[in-house]
Amino acid sequence: MSDRACSSCGTVNTGSKVYCSGCGGILQKSTSSAEGAEPASATTAVAQRRSVRIEADRPAPPTLFSRIKGVVRYLLLVALGVVVVLALMEPNERAPETQDIPNARSVIQRMMASARFSPGVLSQQLLNSCLAQQGSSTWESPVRLVPMPTWESFRVEIEAGKITVFAVLSVMGRPLHLSETFCPEGLSGEWRLVPVSASIGLLKLPRKLLPGITPLIRAGMSPFDTELASLATSRNLVMRPGMIEFTAR
């Protein structure tokens, strides 16, 4: 068999070669005439078919649109990761140390009952003592073996015209710090607490997402539904720094 020059790199190879010793390409048989052309060997035919299949399976080069799409997908994943990390981080706020008030729930109930005759005052210290004595609570799962969140703790901060509720919610053993700020709105006997801001961990939530946090806060405060309903029907309701002043109907 005669020597053959590689059509790709020009390296001269012996006739028994199937692949070029210079570049590794497949050596083509000489086809000087249709009748005198030497038939390709089985090895060469298999190699040629393999080369054709590899070329057919090779992915097309990325287009500009596909590259832009990949960049956008990457940025969205990074943004999602940042959101998750911020939501799981513990905020820097620390509850002020105050003296615990024994039987705080009973004190609140007596104060609300007497508010029919004289204005009542619920101090921030009294409310936080009651919330601390309440302890943790857990939603009852409608499906067995499905873990449900647990409200580990609650506390409030009262400022002029607003109250902020801080909650620690345990989800599958991981604490999640929630906070939501409410402002009282309405008229005498028809007060309501309107959410104005909220956060999860260090992540501040836009106002459009507040309806998703409010049910969690209200569910944890459900043991105080009676007291909250009484405040909602008060003749007067004023929030001052560290206290709530009200007059029952």
Image (cartoon, grey):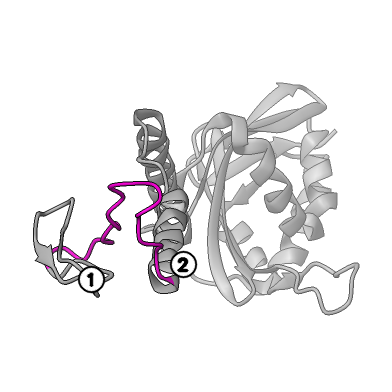
The circle on residue 240 is: none
Left or right position of 222 against 131: right
The residue lying furthest to the top in this view is 187
| The C terminus, quarter of image | top right
Which residue is at 49% across, 71% downward? 99
* 9 vs 73: above or below: below
Left or right position of 245 against 241: right
* Residue 120 visible in the current orientation: no
* 169 vs 232: above or below: below
Residue type at numbered disc 2: Thr
Q: How many marks?
A: 2
In the rendered image, residue 69, in percent from the top left (x then y), is placed at 42, 35
The circle on residue 1 is: 1
Disc 2 vs disc 1: which is toward the camera? 1
Residue in front for this viewpoint, 244 or 159: 159
What span is in magenta? 22-41
| Distance between the alpha carbons at the discs numbered 2 and 1 | 100 Å
Residue in front for this viewpoint, 227 or 174: 174
Reply yes or no: does residue 66 show up in magenta. Answer: no
Residue type at numbered disc 1: Met
Q: Secondary structure at mark 2?
A: loop
| The N terminus, quarter of image | bottom left
In the rendered image, residue 46, in percent from the top left (x then y), is placed at 45, 68
Residue 185 quadrant: top right
Reply yes or no: does residue 26 show up in magenta. Answer: yes
The circle on residue 98 is: 2
Which residue is at 9% across, 63% downward? 12
Q: Main secondary structure of the magenta part?
A: loop
